[in-house]
Amino acid sequence: MAANDLSSRLDALESENQLLHARVAELEATQTATETVLSRRRLLGRAGTIAAAGAGAALGSSMLSTERAAAADGDPLLVGQGNTATDVTVLTTTPGVGNNALQLDVTGNRGLRVNTTGSGGYGISVFADNDGAGILCTRNAGSGDYPAGSFYNTAANGPAFVAGTDHPSNSRNAIGLYHLGLGQAVVVQTSNQSNTLPSVQIEHAGNSPALDIVANNSGRTTTMVRVSANGLGSAITATNNVTTNSAAMISVEHAGTGRLVSALNSNDESNASGVFARVAGEGAGVEGRSDNGRGGVFTGKLAQVRLSPGPGTTHPTGGSRGDLYCDRTGRLWFCKGPNRWAQVV
């Protein structure tokens, strides 16, 4: 169809619309308010239908010969097919308390999937501007061993999950876990045997403990912390590389009547010590103190205490009162004061 013909048809349709609007004005002058509203809606609807039909007929032949244009910003969201937009889509609702602003009911195995192809962005970004959680994951049914929420990272690097609080005065937890069931509240598993990094790493810059474990099980004998090592490495390793740190490496405080530390090696073929301590300075390897009892109690089948002989043939040149020393010849010396030694045996 020629451009001149299309222009003529559109001019004719515009003239018809003007006549219809004039007719509506005449009816409004003579009819009641209710009838006027109804008539205006009816006639305007007819005018829109006629205009749309005329325009569709005029452009139909040219549209059939071309491909359908891509959806533009502002078009409705079409269910059941892909939708493309170049601008941000915002949904603003004011639901009542307990109601969902957006609800997806899916019978398949995936309710929502978000793919991002940009760099440094987020697949889903949720902000809670008031009291409440930004994201709530709930699993209400099902017999399978599936979590309420799962995070996976199949890329070459980067964490699968990051939680943080950006407000310096926030006194709440970055991650809070609540568990009412019979299983573990947290399970961390590293299945890559070539991995040399820890499964859990805590970096803390504050003055409070980096890890605080509280067991609210009064009246029960449940162990608060249990560490099991099935490999060849140590179950627990504590390291502090700050040379000016004068605090205890491991501090244990107990208000009950039991032992502070209990160690057991259940392998009856082991020749290793139950407790081994070594210092590079002049401090004691093991120090025991009791405010009302004995500083040390030793029991053994072969001997209660064994003094490993020193390299010299006599006592050291120095010494402090109360020192016991066994030289390499087997003689036992007791220090009565500064450099005052007496042979006991």
Image (spheres, helix red, strand yellow):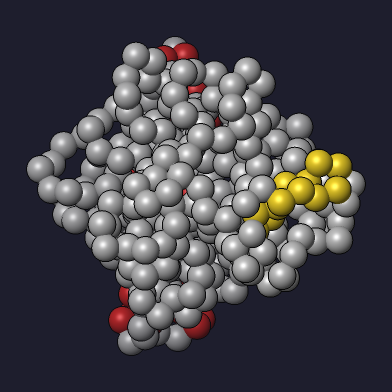
Image quadrant in which you'd find residue 330: bottom right
Q: Residue furthest right?
A: 338
Q: Is residue 68 visible?
A: yes
Going 37% across and 20% down the picture, which residue do you hit? 217
Q: Position of residue 327 (x, y in %)?
A: 67, 64
Is 116 placed above or below 137 here?
below
Going 80% across and 61% down the picture, which residue do you hit? 316
Q: Position of residue 207 (x, y in %)?
A: 76, 38
Is 47 placed above or below 181 here?
below
Left or right: 266 as drawn, with respect to 122: left
Going 63% across and 37% down the picture, which residue do you hit? 288
Q: Position of residue 285 (x, y in %)?
A: 66, 53
Q: Is residue 21 visible?
A: no
Which residue is more in the foreground, 22 or 195? Answer: 195
Which residue is more in the foreground, 329 or 55? Answer: 329
The quadrant of the image that shows the N terminus is: bottom left
Q: Position of residue 24 (x, y in %)?
A: 47, 32
Going 62% across and 68% down the picture, which residue do you hit? 329
Which residue is more in the foreground, 47 or 226? Answer: 226
Which residue is more in the foreground, 40 or 138? Answer: 138
Number of callouts in the render?
0
Left or right: 6 as drawn, with respect to 118: left
